[in-house]
Amino acid sequence: MDFDIKDINLAEEGRLRIEWANKSMPVLNLIKDRFEKEKPLKGVRVAACLHVTTETASLMVTLKAGGASVVVCASNPLSTQDDVTASLVRDCEIPVFAKKGEDNETYYKHINSALDIKPMITMDDGADLISTLHSQRTELIDGIIGGTEETTTGIIRLRSMANEGVLRYPIIAVNDADTKHLFDNRYGTGQSTIDGIIRATNRLLAGSVFVACGYGWCGRGVAMRAKGMGANVIVTEVDPLRALEAVMDGYRVMPIADAAQIGDFFCTLTGDINVIRKEHFLKMKDGTIIANSGHFNVELEIKGLEEISDNKRRIRDSIDEYTLKDGRRINLLGEGRLINLASAEGHPSSVMDMSFANQALSAEYLVRNGKKFDNIVYRVPIEIDERIAKLKLESMGVEIDTLTEEQKKYLASWDMGT
């Protein structure tokens, strides 16, 4: 078995951490039990470009239990957990191509190594695997049934490809499932982003001014958690509806140019490029802390920060201190990469349980139906979304009502008014 990881001797530590995470993933475990019996993915080759974490390991084991041949590579150079890669290789016999801190050349080399499996299903988090397929490995595309995409950033890229008519196989947008974005993005990103910022800095949020750039589901979650820890939260937005929602939720809303002058912490969560730019860095206070929770490090204009700086030093693990020409210091966390994985462990496994349940069931759905689809981006079928929500409630011991026949009839009628 071919693989490229940091150190196979880390496997035992990784095995225990995978076991711990798996205890909070009851929905995925139920799917795994069914997959082991039914083998719905038998003979299917899956290439996954995801954050290689403990939770991802449970997904890979589930896919393998369903009969798939699986290979995994990293979707971000700083998100890999090296002990997890070792356990996947040693204990699960799953090929892994990922090392934390790998350079850009190695990153794309690993993506190509994953593609060497000649996949029938792709799983992506950011669309780099699909992008590489469409630009460098086009000879493999005819053998692909379909793919899934995990994150907002990737969906933006893939919808652009579909709109331009260059997407060559169907994609299911796992990110758009309610059991993904309502929980993973809001509660998972909310907690894990704050966790990453605090682990990196050991600074107090209470009483500080915290600027959340973007008020999508991830921004909502981070703003909510920062507020809960006592920060004075400012939201910046370009969407008037989201900005209005932030105002009604009790936050101050203003342009980033104004927020730059008063913020203590800044975190970008937009999926767009150069949200905080050179002109904003020039307005910031001495000691300002900058982080990004978007998938790629493009949300911060790091090149612009370097241009206005006289000195850069690694002052603490995950913190680069930039000294501006007038002596003010700006602290960049995790090299501008997604802070919840660059400095912490990513989302809690209980929310990834739903996200990866969507991945597993979407892969099964593609195997059964993918050949009927057009080369566009599809939403996760509502029946999958609802099934996952019901399973999650059951695992939590929560019961809900069901509609009576009378209620069903009323909801389906047009002539039963007051």
Image (cartoon, rainbow, N blue to C red):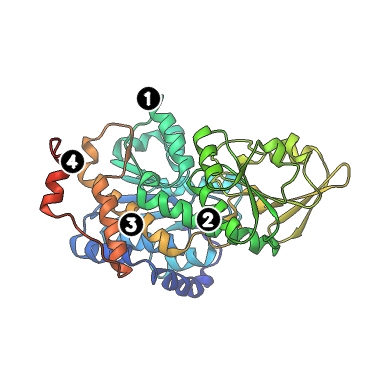
- Residue labelled with disc 4: 418
Amino acid marked by disc 1: Gly
Q: What percent of the width, then of the height, locates residue 277?
A: 70, 36
- Residue labelled with disc 2: 190
In this rendered view, identify the residue nearer to me: 352 or 376. Answer: 352
Badges 1 and 2: C-beta atoms under 8 Å apart? no
Mark found first going from the N terminus, 1 or 2: 1
Answer few, some or many: residues within 10 Å of disc 4's Cα (few below 14, many 20 plus, some between 14 and 19): few
Callout in the foreground (1, 4): 4
Callout in the foreground (3, 1): 3
Mark found first going from the N terminus, 4 or 2: 2
Q: Is residue 122 visible?
A: yes
Mark found first going from the N terminus, 3 or 1: 1
Callout in the foreground (1, 2): 2
| Cα separation between marks 1 and 2 | 35 Å
Task: Locate the N terminus and report the quarter of the image it occupies.
Answer: bottom left
| Cα separation between marks 1 and 4 | 49 Å
| Cα separation between marks 2 and 3 | 20 Å
- Residue labelled with disc 1: 165
| Cα separation between marks 4 and 2 | 43 Å
* Element carrying mark 3: helix
Answer few, some or many: residues within 10 Å of disc 3's Cα (few below 14, many 20 plus, some between 14 and 19): many
Relative to 111, residue 62 above or below? below
Query: Which numbered disc covers residue 357?
Result: 3
Amino acid marked by disc 4: Thr
Amino acid marked by disc 3: Ala
Q: What percent of the width, then of the height, locates residue 159?
A: 41, 32
